[in-house]
Image (cartoon, rainbow, N blue to C red):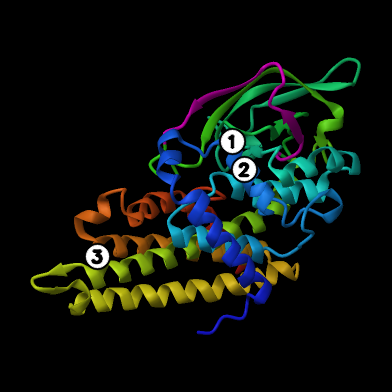
Amino acid sequence: MQRTVFNEDHEAYRKTIRDFIEKEVAPYHHEWEDQGHPPREFYNKLGELGVLGVEVPEEYGGGGETSLKWAFVAMEEASRAGVSFGNASVHTNLILPYLLAYATDEQRQRWLPGFASGEIMTAIAMTEPGTGSDLAGMATTAKLSEDGTHWILNGAKTFISGGALADLILVVARTSPTTEQDRRRGLTILCVDTTSEGFAVGRKLNKIGMKASDTAELSFTDVKVPVRNVLGEEGKAFDYLSHNLPQERLMIALGGYTTAAAALQFAIDYVKERTVFGKPVAAFQNTKFVLAECATEVEAMQIMVDRALELHDAGELSIADAAKAKLFCTEAAGRVIDKCLQLHGGYGYVTEYPIARLYADTRVSRIYGGTSEVMKTIIAKSIGL
């Protein structure tokens, strides 16, 4: 079906991204996977290209765009090439909305120019060793100093995307106790400079996929965080996190679609070239039927994410809408990529082929940003159950 979500400017941007990937990403991506992340200067190159600052307001050195369509284009092109931009997506699509919505003018002046240029890379630290989706059970604490000039932060975080290379980390910490009536109160976002004494990057987690994206354990031992680095109001972090979840889940849904669409094209190309029993794999009826099923699911995903994207840009994407998009697209991506890998035979299990990397990379999409089970709970509540 004909798409209407992109215009000529988006397509020109697409060409720029595609050329950049060909020259600056594809030749080196295997090296990044081996070392667990791109070189730090890669993010400066993304900044120079304008990728990191597309949605940063112009007064802070950005492009001033307000639509996620630019990010969608970049995701499509990266998936199409079977590569990633490390943790750039977390930086631009997950962290920036917090800074735009809750940072003071003074904080924006300090952080956004470097955010756009790649001089300041960011991460967000919510998950802890003992808590996953239950943020109210958080054990990391921060206490205000006696003179009221800084917070003293103690605790540990895990599964932090981009945590190893980040310069500024948005840390969610408990600044006041819970009550029986409200377990969610008392959480605050503190923006931690990673050069601070007492901050440490621990183990870099060895994941089954997304190997060019560093994921780390972090620790905070009496880290002093100036009060001017509190993001938004004290005690309001849970509300802030909930407010930004629809966009986070939409981005994960978009990623499900882009990886599934890429897997489909990889499989189509492969079965046309691969010969078995004297004829191309594409000639067998089973191959045709499997890929017909995959093409149909991919198009259904495309229609859903395109519509969700339009709703988001209009400020009308609900929590339930985002949950439906994430649930459907991540589950469908798992099915499509698995079928496409199967058509590759043994070669589909070799990481030299992008289908193998897509297979491993996509699995986590049903876990982070809220598990599929959490999405089902949200959707069920929205229909009165």
At a point 20% along the width and 54% down the height, the residue shown is 346
Left or right placement of residue 231 versus residue 346 in this view: right
Secondary structure beneath dot 2 equals: helix
Q: Which mark is residue 64?
A: none
Crowding near pointer 1: few (<14 within 10 Å), some, many (20+)? few
Crowding near pointer 3: few (<14 within 10 Å), some, many (20+)? many
Secondary structure beneath dot 3 equals: helix
Q: Position of residue 293 (x, y in %)?
A: 34, 76
Which of pointers 3 and 2 lies earlier in the amino acid sequence?
Answer: 2
Which of pointers 1 and 3 lies earlier in the amino acid sequence?
Answer: 1
Q: Position of residue 38 (x, y in %)?
A: 52, 39
Task: Find disc 2 in the rendering and name its residue.
Answer: 43
Image marks 2 and 1: residues in contact by CB distance under 8 Å: yes
Q: Is residue 184 magenta?
A: yes
Q: Give the amino acid type for the residue marked by disc 1 in the picture.
A: Arg
Q: Is residue 244 magenta?
A: no
Q: CA distance from mark 3 to mark 2?
A: 36 Å
Residue most toward the bottom?
1
Q: CA distance from mark 1 to mark 3?
A: 37 Å
Q: Give the amino acid type for the residue marked by disc 2 in the picture.
A: Tyr
Task: Find disc 3 in the rendering and name its residue.
Answer: 343
- Establish if 300 lies above or below 39: below
Q: Which residues are magenta?
A: 183-206
- Give the label, 3 or 2, closer to the camera: 2
Image marks 1 and 3: residues in contact by CB distance under 8 Å: no
Task: Find disc 1 in the rendering and name its residue.
Answer: 40
Secondary structure beneath dot 1 equals: helix
Q: Nearer the viewer, residue 180 or 260?
A: 260
Q: Position of residue 150 (x, y in %)?
A: 84, 22
Residue 119 image-quadrant placement: top right
